[in-house]
């Protein structure tokens, strides 16, 4: 054993084992490097364990099987109470206000890199690790930790991790962020991991594969109202503004409107004061396109905002996951300095949605972001 491997063998790393292939390979890679690896399975949701849509029990069985193959300990930890208080309650508040939140971002900041991190430290860990496709780098010039995109652009998850701070990043490892998904699958198959071919999970963890509207209906009261076009003409009825998001095409129930062309309808706006949903026809309708936005509830990876830039080329941003970076000018002036920022995009952005996150990048470096508050054409 080399001196470096001997040093790593004294370093305890707690890995969040989800039952998926990414976290499984994460644990394998760290053990191979010589770290002392312990697995933790996080249970973040209760109340649906007997439901056909909840995979928590199956995921734990898969995680335990991975731990057995790798020869590491695994602990089952219940964070359901923390999740309900810190993530789900905010999720319901946002939807009730007609916004569209991203609970996965809040879950990372409040559960996976806070409650889980705290628990790991109590276990004597020096680091935690997850199967996220992202990277961490210490910038020698600034002595700050940087959050970088994963090398696999098709799987990069830095968007979901943009609220992590210096303390959290200093304790975090993302081994698969250095790999492409195909390589992760190959490694899992090569070493005989039982979940090597397991399908990637999709959707919000507490909703699973169930119909979204059916789930939300349990917690938010229906307030049906009118669907109108941009001229004020009534073209349909909605079941409640909370059940729709900007840019939504499916489930509007609009059809056969007299004088309207046979072109798809999209949700363009919500008027909470009159309980009216505004829908327009055509993917590129002007009401669906925005060049500017403001964001609040800001979090910067470096602990401070980046420098203002009036040039729409120094920075780029995403207003939703799986969206290409778009060049923008960044401003954090006046009353927005501490709490928010404004972005001015070179190219119009489609269906910018209040409640979602606008995340700012400088090349491959994720600088942070905030929750979209307003948009402008």
Image (cartoon, rainbow, N blue to C red):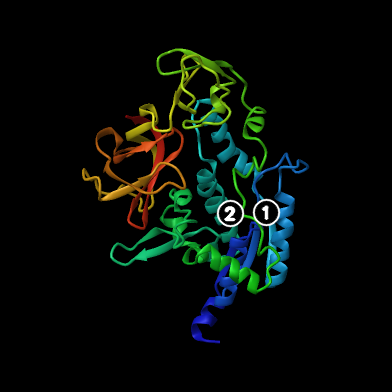
| Residue at which label 2 appears | 116
Look at 47% across and 66% down and name the residue there. Answer: 178
Q: Do the residues labelled 2 and 1 touch (CB within 8 Å)?
A: yes
- Taking 372 as reference, is 252 above or below it? above
User: For the residue carrying disc 1, how many other residues have a C-alpha within 10 Å: few (<14), some (14-19), or many (20+)?
Assistant: few
Indicate the secondary structure of the residue bearing disc 2: helix
Dot placed on the residue nearer the N-terminal end, 2 or 1: 1
Indicate the secondary structure of the residue bearing disc 1: strand
- Taking 276 as reference, is 205 above or below it? below
Kindly identify which numbered label has been placed on residue 290. Answer: none
Does residue 79 appear left or right of residue 114 in this picture? Answer: right
Does residue 118 appear left or right of residue 143 in this picture? Answer: right
Look at 74% across and 58% down and name the residue there. Answer: 61
| Residue at which label 1 appears | 77
Q: Distance between the residues labelled 2 and 1?
A: 9 Å
In which quadrant of the rendered view does residue 221 lie? top right
Quadrant occupied by the N terminus:
bottom right
Is residue 70 at all visible to an observer of this figure?
yes
Look at 29% across and 62% down and name the residue there. Answer: 142
């Amino acid at each position: 054993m080399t001196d470096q491997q001997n040093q790593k063998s004294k370093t305890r790393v707690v890995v969040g084992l989800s039952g998926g292939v990414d976290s499984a390979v994460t644990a394998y890679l760290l053990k191979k490097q010589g770290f002392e690896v312990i697995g933790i399975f996080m249970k973040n949701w209760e109340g649906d364990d007997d439901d056909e849509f909840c995979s928590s029990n199956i995921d734990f069985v898969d995680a335990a099987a991975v731990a057995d193959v790798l020869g590491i300990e695994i602990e089952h930890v219940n964070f359901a109470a923390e999740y309900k208080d810190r993530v789900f309650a905010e999720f319901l508040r946002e939807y009730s206000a007609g916004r569209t939140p991203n609970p996965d971002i809040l879950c990372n900041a409040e559960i996976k890199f806070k409650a889980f991190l705290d628990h790991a430290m109590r276990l004597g860990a020096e680091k935690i690790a997850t199967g996220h496709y992202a990277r961490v780098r210490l910038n020698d010039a600034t002595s700050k930790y940087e959050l970088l995109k994963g090398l696999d652009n098709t799987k990069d998850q830095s968007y979901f991790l943009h609220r992590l701070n210096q303390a959290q990043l200093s304790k975090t490892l993302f081994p698969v962020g250095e790999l492409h998904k195909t390589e992760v699958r190959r490694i899992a198959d090569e070493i005989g991991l039982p979940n090597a071919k397991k399908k990637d999970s999709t959707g919000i963890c507490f909703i699973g594969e169930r119909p979204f509207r059916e789930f939300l209906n349990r917690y938010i009261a229906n307030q049906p109202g009118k669907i109108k076009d941009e001229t004020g003409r009534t073209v349909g009825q909605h079941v409640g503004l909370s059940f729709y998001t900007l840019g939504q095409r499916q489930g509007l129930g609009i059809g056969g409107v007299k004088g309207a062309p046979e072109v798809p309808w999209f949700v363009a706006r919500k008027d909470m004061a009159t309980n009216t949903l505004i829908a327009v026809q055509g993917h590129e309708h002007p009401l669906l396109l925005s060049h500017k936005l403001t964001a609040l509830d800001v979090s910067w990876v470096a602990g401070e905002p980046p420098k203002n830039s009036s040039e729409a080329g120094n920075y780029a941003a995403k207003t939703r996951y799986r969206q290409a970076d778009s060049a923008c000018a960044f401003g954090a002036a006046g009353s927005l300095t501490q709490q928010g920022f404004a972005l001015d995009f070179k190219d119009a952005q489609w269906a910018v949605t209040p409640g979602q996150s606008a995340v700012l990048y400088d090349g491959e470096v994720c600088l942070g972001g905030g929750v979209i508050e307003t948009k402008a054409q």
